[in-house]
Amino acid sequence: MAASTEPVTPEPVTPVPVAHSGPGKVVVSRLSTTGHQEIGHLYLITSFSFFLFGGLLALLMRAEPPSRPRTGPRPQLVHPPNEAWHA
């Protein structure tokens, strides 16, 4: 049996229409993913954002309000620097 020498022409491929993905669909797909790498990225992003938020809260707690006078004993009067600790 002889081989056919006719050239094979590929059929034209029509592109499949892709639905436009808006920002809401991207957020929902990221938050509802089951891929382990994306879950790891979300975990790192969340932990770092909570770390920054906690640092900001710590700075706000540490800041002294300038308008209110200081009440209570001063640290030098409670624990004088030259006095030894007594057990």
Image: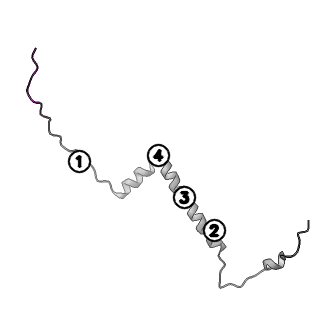
The earlier-in-sequence mark between 1 and 3 is 1
Location of residue 81 in the rendering, given as x and y in whole percent from the top left corner: 83, 76
Report how far apart the C-alphas of labels 4 and 3 lie in the structure: 17 Å
Residue ID at (66%, 78%): 64
Which residue corresponds to the image point at 18% horizontal and 40% vertical from the top-left? Answer: 13
Question: What residue did someone put label 3 on?
Answer: 48
Q: Counting residues from the N terminus, which is met first, the one under dot 4 or under dot 1?
A: 1
Distance, label 2 to label 3, CA atoms, is 15 Å
Q: Residues within 10 Å of mark 3 (few under 14, many from 20)?
A: few
Q: Earlier in the sequence, mark 2 or mark 1?
A: 1
How packed mark 1 is, by other alpha carbons closer than 10 Å (few <14, some 14-19, many 20 or more), is few
Q: Are marks 2 and 1 in contact (CB under 8 Å)?
A: no
Residue drawn at 83 percent across, 79 percent down: 77
Amino acid type indicated by mark 3:
Phe
Q: Earlier in the sequence, mark 4 or mark 3?
A: 4
Residue picked out by circle 1: 17
Which residue type carries mark 4?
Gln
The image position of residue 44, as x and y in percent, is 52, 53
Q: Which residues are magenta?
A: 1-9
What residue is drawn where x is 65% and y is 83%?
66
Judged by depth in the image, the label closer to the viewer, 1 or 3, is 3
Q: Which residue is mark 2?
A: 58
Label 3 near label 4: C-beta < 8 Å? no
Q: Earlier in the sequence, mark 2 or mark 3?
A: 3
